[in-house]
Amino acid sequence: MQHEVLVAVFQKRDDELCVLLWQRALAPESGTWSLPGGALGADEDLPASATRQLAEKVDVQELAHLEQLSVFSDPHRVPGPRTIASTFLGLIPSPSDPHLPPDTRWHPVSDLPQTSFDHGVVIRHARRRLAAKLSYTNIAFALAADEFTMSALRDLYTCAIGHAVDTTNLQRILRRRGVITPTGKTAPPGRAGGWPAALFRFTESRLRVTDEFAVLRPPV
Amino acid sequence: MQHEVLVAVFQKRDDELCVLLWQRALAPESGTWSLPGGALGADEDLPASATRQLAEKVDVQELAHLEQLSVFSDPHRVPGPRTIASTFLGLIPSPSDPHLPPDTRWHPVSDLPQTSFDHGVVIRHARRRLAAKLSYTNIAFALAADEFTMSALRDLYTCAIGHAVDTTNLQRILRRRGVITPTGKTAPPGRAGGWPAALFRFTESRLRVTDEFAVLRPPV
């Protein structure tokens, strides 16, 4: 039985949530697009393997968040010897533009090319997990720029979740929960002119559940 | 490389959160207590394997919830050939009293016997996941009786989370979020007499996130 690691790395690019894929040059399924990953090494655990394998496709310094997702264990998920896949979600902040090897490219999750084996299912699963976590954690810190306007943050939530989000409500709820903090600065006005927009930042850059039932928090 | 499944099955028993363990009769680590589980079979995926292996220790009809947790992949986590463990959280409702094989027993998670290999770490990890999910989902349905008083539900939250919870606040927040519903019935008065207590039930018996940011819900 073999064991591999697959990482779905997401980034917002040009108002699209994109995933990092590389194109297989050889059989099986040559020409299809695969998630970065590969066989678990003898002396490493899964998170170390995910980080190592990702380093072959993209500078992992750029990763702001990496978490384990489900294990894909269908006995016939790939041809050849049985291979179990441990999957991960990786997130890269908006302004990064990592250098990519020639076989690797960003693809909008709403318009995927032909993916290899069960990698399309893994991508959809990772995207659902991301959308769910956006609704009860501060995970958006790992996709956002250091400082952002509320309309930029709304665009980020909208493309990551896949449906429209209201800017005023988003600001109200994220500020009430202490997820974002005003920087006191404003963005330079856009081409359309108008009032300068306030800049915000994420209060923390580590994942936490932001709207747990207060009644269940441990006493201080 | 081998692959095994381990299941942390929790139930509230006598006001303690308990976990199901069996005692190893043979080396390695004979006499220590292990989570139910075993090697992944050639023709099954992980959830099927977890269900099958659990059936050897307890009637799986009693399981109200089963979900995948982390993979434990330290190269030296067990003696002998490298074995990767996919772990699961299983929950059994309060009033069930499953028949157990002679080597198997419920143990309070606050007072564990000597556990095998890394199974103690798996149990703590599963308990942390349970406590976290109690704070943003309706997962308590899988530990509660069909109908319950608020003080019984408070006792359940208290033992599962590990610190005191206020009954009035718990009722207010769970009713506001639609997690529990009054049945219109009352419990027979206890030995101490007093007013009959209202009975409640969980509104749904499928896991859902109950306090996602409303602003992020899909439009209807």
Image (spheres, coloured by chain):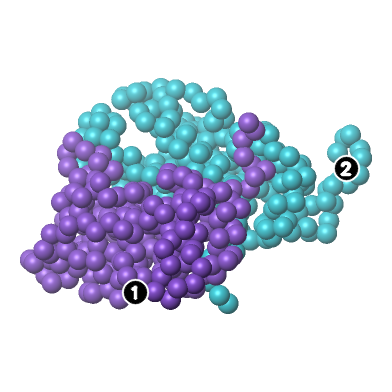
Chain colours: A cyan, B purple
Q: Which marked residue is nearer to the observer: mark 1 or mark 2?
A: 1
Residue found at the far right of this picture: A194
Q: In the shown orientation, is residue B37 left or right of residue B159?
A: left
**Residue A211 spot, x, y in % from top left:** 60, 57
Q: Give the residue pinned by disc 1.
A: B110
Disc 2 crowd rating (10 Å Cα; few below 14, some 14-19, many 20+) is few
**Residue B79 spot, x, y in % from top left:** 17, 63
- Which mark is on residue B165? none
- The one of B189 and B104 positioned closer to us in this rendering: B189
The quadrant where residue A87 appears: top left
The quadrant where residue B81 appears: bottom left
Q: Is residue A140 visible?
A: yes
| SS assignment at label 2 | loop
Mark 2 chain? A
- The one of A16 and A53 positioned closer to us in this rendering: A16
Q: Is residue B157 visible?
A: no
Question: Which amino acid type corresponds to the residue marked 1 in the rendered image?
Answer: Ser
At x 54% / y 31%, what residue is drawn? A109
- The one of B111 and B179 positioned closer to us in this rendering: B179
Q: Give the residue pinned by disc 2.
A: A189
At x 69% / y 60%, what residue is drawn? A178
- The one of A128 and B109 positioned closer to us in this rendering: B109
Residue B88, placed above or below residue A100: below
Mark 1 chain? B
